């Protein structure tokens, strides 16, 4: 009874508001340099935020950013809490069964293993990865023992404290961490570039084909005029992979 | 915050720390303590209301209502509260949107399209065009309902027990004065039950305080979210790079919760004394004796 | 795949026996019931061991709290306040963060190297936290019960010439237990339900071996449908809780067997304890 009253109140409260095409963009905000929270403002920033804003401008959409934890990022998309995902999400078959992707906006970015020593046993040891990432799926299929964490920085912390022998993640995410660790973390020899996935794309609900097409067009345009490559170089450094 | 914070990389020591602790993200962290307090302030009365409804239903003379009350009050004994927290907000959210979809949109459109739960734009809750704070407020609203459902069931248990504990003779006296059943409830039962309910309700308040970190599981950006976010190791992509400091952030949370508990214990101790005045209980007797001596 | 096959593959998955990869497709009811049930093993493991160890420790702490010496009373008070005054969720986080700071190579104690790495695993680390947590709550209950042991009982024991340990073991302790038992039952239920927090807080799931809720959320995430997996987990917990209540009821009858007409059914009021 009370629930119904509250529901009715909620209905009345928001019923009369106007509506325009506003797109809510879901992101994680914990995966630098793809997306992270700016210390100064508390807002999300990063490669995907800059790219997403540019895409929205080109597609003439009104976009706002929404932070959501990684492990519930797809469920919240399909239940329409936001309309797109730009969160360093690799395109793969398993996810395609549930959501659809635009064309990739990065080349197939390699993943990599990082560890405390270059000869860490990544095929028989303990490997940390973020829950429900393609990297976690990959580790589960190798002989290694998978240690799952909900947050990306927890996976790195697990290696630092010896909980795991190695961490497996997108190379671009690990690269600055490895560089700034003063030699504490190193790439695992022979496993510093593991091709995985088809590149990172924007995820959308399968029923949202119209929106997908708009973003696809915008991505194509950015690829053609070179502005996408310029963005990639800006955020991932001079030797980053770019589109041909 | 301070004017000298424009270039954090050039700062050191305490100055750096003062800038670090007043960065935008830290201000959000401090604000999230307010979120927790707001949640407590709203949930407590709402849960009490739910509990009162549940207890009255459990005492009802109408059988289906009584069964519902009994089921509601016994529900939380069997199932861990986290399961409710993971379940109730999603169910509520989809329930509301479905209702609005039926009312505001072309209801021949199916809500479930494959995996997708899609309602028309006008039925979205909150609307896509709403400001960010509306979305945050809605998230907290769902959290309040989820907490109230669970703690309402606990409260119903306490209030039901308290109503049973009111001495039968007091109710019979009221009946002898010719009061109707409703009058007895309103004039005697409810005023008298509080002293019996208070120990249970105090306990409930303590449990509620300690359940607030679970907000984090509901997707609300609460103290736990920010402690984890801020404490994690930061590379130079951030203005204030630092190693893994999560332990310190969680120790700060620990202190916050200990303070909350300590303050609550003191306040509740006073209220208990106040309510025992003139009651036919051990506490009331002790006060009378103290007054005589 | 038949359901029997699923049960063989995943029935003991949570302890690492059976199929290595979790199901990737289908997600039928059989898979959900099997895996979530398999996860319940961990909930039972944490609950049983934490309660058993907490019971012994709580008696000690409760005695410390009643002691007239401040050297015993103050630490007992502080311990109880610390663990009762803060959320278990935060305790898990802090314990994990603190335990991983221990040196990996082990700690030298009197020339022996004590391994520490196992402490960061959920089976040990979370168990320690749960044990300390329930110790604090139970000690508070036991302390309350000790305070209400009838003076007559103690005087009767004195009259029989019992002193010290004998008096405690044969008179005070059984009476305390009898008085504390209804509240202690509630504490046990609370603790059992709190075991679902283990994999939702600091402790990582090693090789995807988790508890009932871990697998329930696995399925809820994959199927995007919280309306099946969580109710299954809830059903398991209802059954396990009823069993627990029955078990504690049996003990209660035994504790009260010398009292005619008393100690029939225990009334469980969850709120009067935690």
Image (cartoon, rainbow, N blue to C red):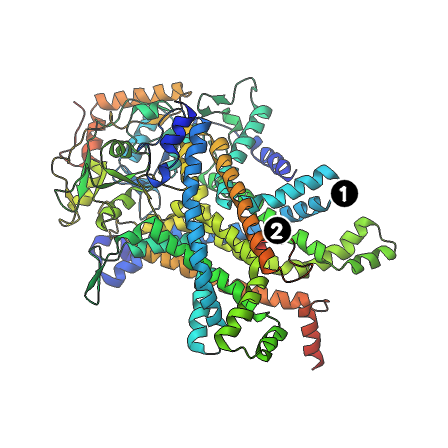
* Residue A89 figure quarter: top left
The numbered mark at residue B61 is: 1
Question: Do the residues bearing badges 2 and 1 touch, measured as CB atoms within 8 Å?
Answer: no
- What quarter of the picture does the N terminus of chain A occupy? top right
Q: Label 2: state its secondary structure.
A: helix
Say left or right for C256 vs A202.
right
The first of marks 2 and 1 along the sequence is: 1
Where does the image place residue B244, in percent across and percent down from the top left?
27, 52
- Crowding at label 2, few (<14), some or many (≥20) Cα neighbours within 10 Å? many
Q: Check chain identity for marks 2 and 1: say if they share one.
A: yes
Residue B8 position in % (x across, y down): 24, 53
Residue under mark 2: which chain is it in? B
Tell me how far mark 2 sits from mark 1, CA to CA: 20 Å
Left of C35 or right of it: where is B186?
right
Residue located beneath label 2 in the image: B155
In this view, which residue lies farthest toward the bottom?
B293
Viewer-nearest residue: C100 or B211: C100
Q: What residue is rendered at 23% in x and 23% in y?
A: A223
Q: Position of residue A174 (x, y in %)?
A: 21, 40
Answer above or below: position of C262 versus A3: below
Q: Nearer the viewer, residue A39 or B145?
A: B145
Q: Is residue C115 visible?
A: yes
* Mark 2 or 1: the one toward you: 1
Image position, residue B273 (x, y; %):
64, 68
The disc placed on residue A36 is none
Residue nearest the observer in this picture, C81 or B22: C81
Which SS class for mark 1?
Answer: loop
* Residue at 60% over, 25% down: B103
Farthest residue, direction top: B108
Camera-nearest residue between B174 and A1: B174
Chain for disc number 1: B
């Amino acid at each position: 009874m009370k629930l119904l009253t509250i529901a009715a109140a909620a209905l009345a409260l928001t019923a009369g508001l106007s509506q325009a095409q506003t797109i809510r963009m879901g992101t994680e905000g914990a995966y630098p340099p793809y997306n992270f929270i700016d210390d100064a403002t508390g807002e999300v920033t990063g490669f995907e935020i800059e790219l997403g804003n540019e895409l929205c401008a080109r597609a003439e959409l009104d976009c706002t950013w929404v932070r959501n934890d990684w492990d519930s990022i797809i469920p919240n998309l399909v239940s329409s809490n936001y309309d797109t995902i730009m969160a360093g999400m690799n395109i793969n078959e398993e996810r395609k069964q549930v959501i659809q992707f635009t064309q990739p906006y990065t080349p197939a970015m390699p993943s990599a293993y990082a560890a405390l020593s270059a000869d860490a046993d990544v095929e028989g040891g303990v490997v940390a990865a973020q829950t429900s990432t393609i990297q976690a799926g990959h580790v589960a299929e190798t002989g290694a023992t998978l240690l799952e964490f909900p947050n990306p920085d927890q996976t790195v912390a697990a290696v630092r404290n010896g909980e795991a022998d190695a961490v497996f993640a997108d190379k671009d995410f690990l690269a600055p961490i490895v560089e700034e660790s003063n030699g504490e973390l190193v790439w695992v020899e022979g496993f510093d570039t593991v091709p995985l996935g088809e590149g990172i794309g924007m995820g959308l609900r399968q029923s949202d084909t119209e929106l997908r097409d708009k973003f696809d067009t915008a991505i194509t345009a950015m690829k053609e005029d070179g502005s996408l490559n310029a963005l990639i170089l800006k955020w991932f450094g001079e030797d980053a992979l770019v589109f041909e | 915050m301070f004017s000298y914070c424009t270039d954090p990389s050039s700062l050191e020591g305490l100055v750096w720390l003062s800038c670090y602790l007043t960065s935008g993200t830290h201000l959000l962290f401090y604000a999230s303590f307010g979120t927790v307090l707001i949640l407590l302030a709203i949930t407590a009365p709402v849960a009490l209301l739910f509990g009162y409804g549940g207890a009255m239903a459990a005492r009802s003379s109408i059988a289906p209502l009584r069964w519902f009350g009994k089921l509601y009050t016994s529900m939380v004994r069997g199932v861990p509260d986290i399961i409710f927290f993971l379940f109730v907000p999603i169910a509520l959210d989809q329930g509301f949107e479905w209702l609005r979809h039926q009312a505001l949109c072309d209801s021949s459109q199916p809500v479930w399209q494959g995996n997708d739960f899609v309602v028309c734009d006008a039925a979205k809750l909150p609307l896509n065009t709403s400001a960010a704070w509306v979305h945050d407020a809605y998230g907290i609203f769902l959290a309040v309902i989820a907490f109230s459902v669970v703690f309402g069931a606990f409260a119903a248990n306490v209030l039901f027990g308290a109503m049973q504990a009111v001495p039968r003779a007091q109710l019979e006296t009221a009946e002898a004065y010719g009061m109707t059943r409703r009058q007895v409830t309103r004039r005697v039962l409810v005023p008298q039950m509080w002293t019996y309910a208070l120990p249970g309700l105090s306990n409930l308040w303590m449990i509620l305080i300690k359940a607030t970190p679970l907000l984090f599981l509901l997707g609300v950006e609460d103290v736990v979210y920010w402690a984890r976010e801020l404490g994690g190791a930061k590379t130079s992509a951030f203005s204030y790079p630092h190693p893994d400091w999560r332990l310190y952030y969680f120790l700060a949370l620990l202190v916050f919760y200990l303070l909350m508990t300590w303050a609550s214990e003191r306040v509740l101790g006073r209220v208990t004394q106040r309510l025992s005045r003139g009651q036919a209980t051990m506490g009331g007797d002790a006060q009378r004796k103290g007054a005589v001596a | 795949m038949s359901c029997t096959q699923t049960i063989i593959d995943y029935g003991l998955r949570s302890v690492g026996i059976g199929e290595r990869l979790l199901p990737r497709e289908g997600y039928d009811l059989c898979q959900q019931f099997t895996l979530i049930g398999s996860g319940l093993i961990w909930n039972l493991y944490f609950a049983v061991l934490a309660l058993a160890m907490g019971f012994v420790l709580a008696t000690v702490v409760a005695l410390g709290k009643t002691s007239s010496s401040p050297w015993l009373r103050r630490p007992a008070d502080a311990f109880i306040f610390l663990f009762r005054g803060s959320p278990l969720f935060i305790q898990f986080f802090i314990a994990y963060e603190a335990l991983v700071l221990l040196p990996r190579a082990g700690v030298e104690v009197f020339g022996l190297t004590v391994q520490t790495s196992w402490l960061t695993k959920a089976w040990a680390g979370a168990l320690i936290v749960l044990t300390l947590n329930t110790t604090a709550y139970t000690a508070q209950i036991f302390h309350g019960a000790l305070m209400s042991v009838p003076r007559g009982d103690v005087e009767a024991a004195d009259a029989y010439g019992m002193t010290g340990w004998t008096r405690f073991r044969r008179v005070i302790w059984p009476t305390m237990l009898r008085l504390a038992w209804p509240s202690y039952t509630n504490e046990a239920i609370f603790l059992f339900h709190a075991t679902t927090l283990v994999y939702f807080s600091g402790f990582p799931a090693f090789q995807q071996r988790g508890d009932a809720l871990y697998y329930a959320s696995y399925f809820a995430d994959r199927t995007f449908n919280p309306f099946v997996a969580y109710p299954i987990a809830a059903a398991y917990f209802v059954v396990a809780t009823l069993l627990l209540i029955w078990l504690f009821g049996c003990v209660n009858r035994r504790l009260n067997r010398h009292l005619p007409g008393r100690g029939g059914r225990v009334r469980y009021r969850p709120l009067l304890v935690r």
